Image (spheres, rainbow, N blue to C red):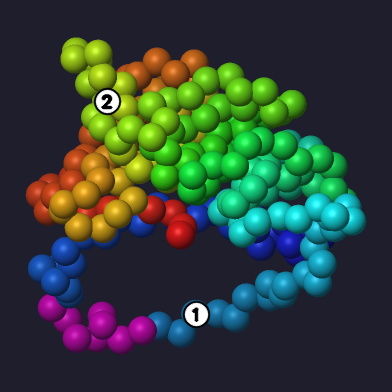
């Protein structure tokens, strides 16, 4: 189980697709791939167990809480599955999402999940109770406090600062015609602070932002 935890807890880097032709190094030696050291990670057979008759959909994301419990965000049915450090099933909860994508756990044990298909970010208590929702379910749009519009556009992952502030990365679909690739910052109670980025090819802009499928 320890190896599984090390494997799953490797941070996933935020990928921002941009036009890179103009950024290619001029030194041909820099284009030669380096040989990376071999990693000692190995898959764990039956890392988790499910009760008879219980099924879990495709995994969208995983996260560990302070107790070492593993939470799996799944697609196509029940959204959340909890397992103890030994991989034993604890419980499952949550209605199906349109397209579950990202999962993080804050210092208070709250679960933050993104639904890229519904354009929402949801915060749950450790008991699975919904505390708040950022965005309007099923509606893609802009977050514009002055206009009274508080919508997200393909939020796919979040990051949590030491003080509890939340950073939402959105804009999952590549290309300039769809999505709005930017980062939005909120207080942990959902109050908007600021945003930056945007879809494009200019400084600070991205074609898309994603941390998974």
Q: Position of residue 67 (x, y in %)?
A: 79, 38
Question: Which residues lie in the magenta part?
Answer: 26-33
Q: Position of residue 185 (x, y in %)?
A: 36, 28
Q: Residue at x 19, y 13 (%)?
A: 146
Q: Earlier in the sequence, mark 1 or mark 2?
A: 1
Is 28 in the magenta?
yes
* Residue 143 numbered tag: 2
- Please tell me in which quadrant of the rendered image residue 125 appears: top right
The CA span between labels 1 and 2 is 42 Å
Q: Nearer the viewer, residue 3 or 210?
A: 210
Q: Is residue 58 left or right of residue 190?
A: right
What is the count of numbered marks?
Answer: 2
* Residue 169 numbered tag: none
- Single out the mark in the foreground, 1 or 2: 2
Q: Residue at x 69, y 59 (%)?
A: 6
Q: Secondary structure at mark 1?
A: loop
Is 27 in the magenta?
yes
- Please tell me in which quadrant of the rendered image residue 3 appears: bottom right
Q: In the rendered view of the protein, which quadrant contains the N terminus?
A: bottom right
Q: Position of residue 170 (x, y in %)?
A: 34, 42
* Residue 36 numbered tag: 1
| Crowding near the residue tagged with mark 2, few <14, some 14–19, many ≥20 C-alpha atoms within 10 Å | some
């Amino acid at each position: 189980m320890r190896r599984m935890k090390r494997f799953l807890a490797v941070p996933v880097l935020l990928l921002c697709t941009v036009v890179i032709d103009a950024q290619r190094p001029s030194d041909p030696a820099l284009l030669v791939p380096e040989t990376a050291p071999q990693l000692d990670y190995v898959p764990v057979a039956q890392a988790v167990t499910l009760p008879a008759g219980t099924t879990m959909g495709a995994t969208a994301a995983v996260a560990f809480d302070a107790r070492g419990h593993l939470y799996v965000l799944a697609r196509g049915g029940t959204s959340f599955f909890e397992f103890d450090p030994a991989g034993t099933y604890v419980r499952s909860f949550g209605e199906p999402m349109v397209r579950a994508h990202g999962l993080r756990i804050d210092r208070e044990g709250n679960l933050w999940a993104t639904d890229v298909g519904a354009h929402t970010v949801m915060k749950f208590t450790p008991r699975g109770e919904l505390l708040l929702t950022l965005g309007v379910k099923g509606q893609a749009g802009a977050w514009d406090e002055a206009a009274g519009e508080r919508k997200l556009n393909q939020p796919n992952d979040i990051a949590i600062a030491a003080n509890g502030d939340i950073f939402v990365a959105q804009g999952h679909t590549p290309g300039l015609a769809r999505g709005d690739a930017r980062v939005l910052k909120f207080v942990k109670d959902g109050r908007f602070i600021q945003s930056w980025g945007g879809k494009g090819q200019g400084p600070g802009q991205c074609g898309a932002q994603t941390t998974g499928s």
